[in-house]
Image (cartoon, rainbow, N blue to C red):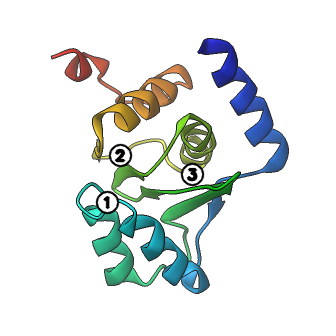
């Protein structure tokens, strides 16, 4: 698995996947959230509330090989329908834009991988002990 994660990171870095979402991406982003409406309710609510408009990106989209996902990255970092390749893209984008966050939450497996990647990249304030409880 570690080799496939490295491969995904190289692939994502080369293609620049994990693009900031804009107001014109709203319908697509809500469709992605609808894939698992219970797990993605927070992200969907933020998209409905904000309309994805503003000077600073707060959500990133990933669409590759039939897999679509989103990562909300404001005070909270929340992946939605993210696989390993999407999480690799999102962690790189989040680290470039944000040095701190109030929380990282969402589906457990997605959060564990995202949190692990953020910690490896040197994000300040990442407490990995909470993941082991």
Please give the label number shown on residue 82.
none
Alpha carbon separation for disc pair 1 and 2: 19 Å
Please give the label number shown on residue 40.
1
Task: Name the residue that disc number 2 marks.
Answer: 101
Residue displayed at 27% across by 54% down: 39
Q: Nearer the viewer, mark 3 or mark 1?
A: 1
Residues at badges 3 and 1 in contact (C-beta under 8 Å)?
no
Q: Residues within 10 Å of mark 3 (few under 14, many from 20)?
A: few
Residues at badges 1 and 2 in contact (C-beta under 8 Å)?
no
Q: Residue 90: horizontal and vertical position, in percent?
A: 56, 46
Q: Nearer the viewer, residue 55 or 1?
A: 1
SS state under label 2: loop
Q: Quadrant of the N terminus?
A: top right
SS state under label 3: helix
Residue 100, placed above or below residue 4 = below
Residue 60, placed above or below residue 99 = below
Q: Earlier in the sequence, mark 1 or mark 2?
A: 1
Q: Residue furthest left?
A: 133
Q: Nearer the viewer, residue 44 or 38?
A: 38
Task: Name the residue that disc number 3 marks.
Answer: 97
Residue displayed at 55% across by 84% down: 23
- Residue 53 in sight here: no
Q: Residue 75: horizontal and vertical position, in percent?
A: 33, 56
| Left or right placement of residue 52 versus residue 128 in this view | right
Residue displayed at 45% across by 34% down: 114
On the image, which quarter does residue 80 sit in? Answer: bottom left
Residue displayed at 55% across by 67% down: 57
Q: Residue 116: horizontal and vertical position, in percent?
A: 44, 24
SS state under label 1: loop
Residue 39, placed above or below residue 99 = below
On the image, which quarter does residue 91 sit in? Answer: top right
């Amino acid at each position: 698995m570690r080799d496939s994660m490295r491969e995904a990171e190289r692939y994502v870095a080369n293609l620049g996947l994990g693009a900031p979402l804009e107001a014109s991406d709203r319908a697509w982003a809500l469709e992605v959230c609808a894939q698992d409406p219970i797990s993605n309710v927070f992200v969907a609510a933020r998209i409905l509330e904000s309309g994805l408009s503003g000077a600073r990106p707060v959500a990133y989209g990933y669409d590759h090989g039939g897999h679509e996902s989103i990562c909300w990255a404001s005070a909270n970092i929340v992946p939605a329908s993210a696989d390993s390749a999407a999480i690799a893209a999102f962690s790189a984008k989040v680290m470039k834009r944000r040095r701190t966050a109030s929380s990282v939450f969402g589906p457990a497996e997605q959060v564990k991988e995202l949190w692990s990647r953020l910690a490896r990249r040197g994000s300040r304030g990442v407490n990995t002990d909470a993941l082991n409880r």
